[in-house]
């Protein structure tokens, strides 16, 4: 009777899972978050890998069960894990060919995690109860790690909305993730303009080296100036370039004359700099910049003969 009930439940769930997989599969290759989409949307989208391969693994497990007994084998689990690995890599390669995306090893990891979750919750591994308890605890930890970027993104997006028109002062722990080239950045408390923390930016000898504010409230229409403080720790003057563009910049070929650009001379110590947003608005040669959709604010140096360092703090808008 117990097996009959389980078989009946399986027969109901299998068509539902099949429909969900058919709906979800095209999203591996079409749609999804754009380059400038919110971090939370990107993080939530990434979790779709776990869900899809959890459902796919559950479907295979459900269909392979017999009406009388279920054979549990580490070999079958290992073979299926290998199939998921191959499928995940193939999906990444096809994504690269179709949409120019780069292969993401973390997506493949999430595919494997979805498979592991399915085998764990269905009890399809040859483990004693104590072993399942330990495995379940490990899976929960891995899932929490996978969900952490979504939590972090949602928390900082809420903080950014609450802080605005302050764009960044690095007093909260996730703010540096609003900036690009995260490996060059370090939140630190030794050199600050105000508060307890500032941002250390490592500059290289590349043609263009710096960082850019990427995730932030984009509507700057009600403000007159952008302010930011930059610390030059050396005695030698450093020329720092500032770039601001809107959401239409890509549609205009990302031309140099279609964005705002200004060069600042950084003297030793703190430099309190500002940019007129009216100048930003009129910077494109053939149009007005859309101040309701400011998309990026970048700071960079050009062709430095050696590696340099700058520090950022207190980036905000004023009326």
Image: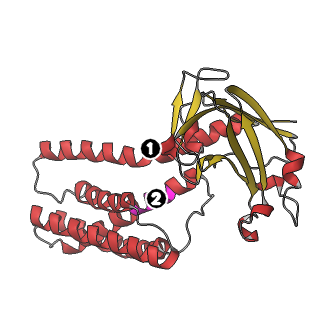
Number of labels in the image equals 2
Q: Are marks 2 and 1 in contact (CB under 8 Å)?
A: no
Give the CA distance from mark 2 to mark 1.
12 Å
Dominant secondary-structure state across the stretch colored magenta:
helix
Would residue 21 be counted in the magenta stretch?
no
Q: Is residue 268 above or below residue 293?
A: above
Q: Is residue 103 above or below residue 235?
A: below
The label on residue 46 is: 2
Q: Quadrant of residue 229?
A: top right
Q: Which residue is mark 1?
A: 148
**Which secondary structure, mark 1?**
helix
Q: Is residue 212 above or below residue 25?
A: above
Residue 177 at x, y percent in the picture? 55, 42
Q: Earlier in the sequence, mark 2 or mark 1?
A: 2
Residue 143 at x, y percent in the picture? 35, 48
The quarter in which the N terminus is drawn is bottom left
Which residue sits at x=25%, y=44%? 138
Q: Quadrant of residue 3?
A: bottom left
Which residue sits at x=39%, y=49%? 146
The magenta region covers 44-49
Q: Nearer the viewer, residue 19 or 235?
A: 235
Regarding residue 215, the answer to whether it shows in the image is: no
Which residue sits at x=38%, y=44%? 144
The quarter in which the C terminus is drawn is top right
Q: Nearer the viewer, residue 238 or 215?
A: 238
Q: Nearer the viewer, residue 162 or 62?
A: 162
Residue 217 at x, y percent in the picture? 72, 46
Regarding residue 319, the answer to whether it shows in the image is: yes
The label on residue 207 is: none
Which residue sits at x=87%, y=53%? 281
Residue 52 at x, y percent in the picture? 39, 66
In the displayed structure, does residue 252 sit left or right of residue 136? right
């Amino acid at each position: 009777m117990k097996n009959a009930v389980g078989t009946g439940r399986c027969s109901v769930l299998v068509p539902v899972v099949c429909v969900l997989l058919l709906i979800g599969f095209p999203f591996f290759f079409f749609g999804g978050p754009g380059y400038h989409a919110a971090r939370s949307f990107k993080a939530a989208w990434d979790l779709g890998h776990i869900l899809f391969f959890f459902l796919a693994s559950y479907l295979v497990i459900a269909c392979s069960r017999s009406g009388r007994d279920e054979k549990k084998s580490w070999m079958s689990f290992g073979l299926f894990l290998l199939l998921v690995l191959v499928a995940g890599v193939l999906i990444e390669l096809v994504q690269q060919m179709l949409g120019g995306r780069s292969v993401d090893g973390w997506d493949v990891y999430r595919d494997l995690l979805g498979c592991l979750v399915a085998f764990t919750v269905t009890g399809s591994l040859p483990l004693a109860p104590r072993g399942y308890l330990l495995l379940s605890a490990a899976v929960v930890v891995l899932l929490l790690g996978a969900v952490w970027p979504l939590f972090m993104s949602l928390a900082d997006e809420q903080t950014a909305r609450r802080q605005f028109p302050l764009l960044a002062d690095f007093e909260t722990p996730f703010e540096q993730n609003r900036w690009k080239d995260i490996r060059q950045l370090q939140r630190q408390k030794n050199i600050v303009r105000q508060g307890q923390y500032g941002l250390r930016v490592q500059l290289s000898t590349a043609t263009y080296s710096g960082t850019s504010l990427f995730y932030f409230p984009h509507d700057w229409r009600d403000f007159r100036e952008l302010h930011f403080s930059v610390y030059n720790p050396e005695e030698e003057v450093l020329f720092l370039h500032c770039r601001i563009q809107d959401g239409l910049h890509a549609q205009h070929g990302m031309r140099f004359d279609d964005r705002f650009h200004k060069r600042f001379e950084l003297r030793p110590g703190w430099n309190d700099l500002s940019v007129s947003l009216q100048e930003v608005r009129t910077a494109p040669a053939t149009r007005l910049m859309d101040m309701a959709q400011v998309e990026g604010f970048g700071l960079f140096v050009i062709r430095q003969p050696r590696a340099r360092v700058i520090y950022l703090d207190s980036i905000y808008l004023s009326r």
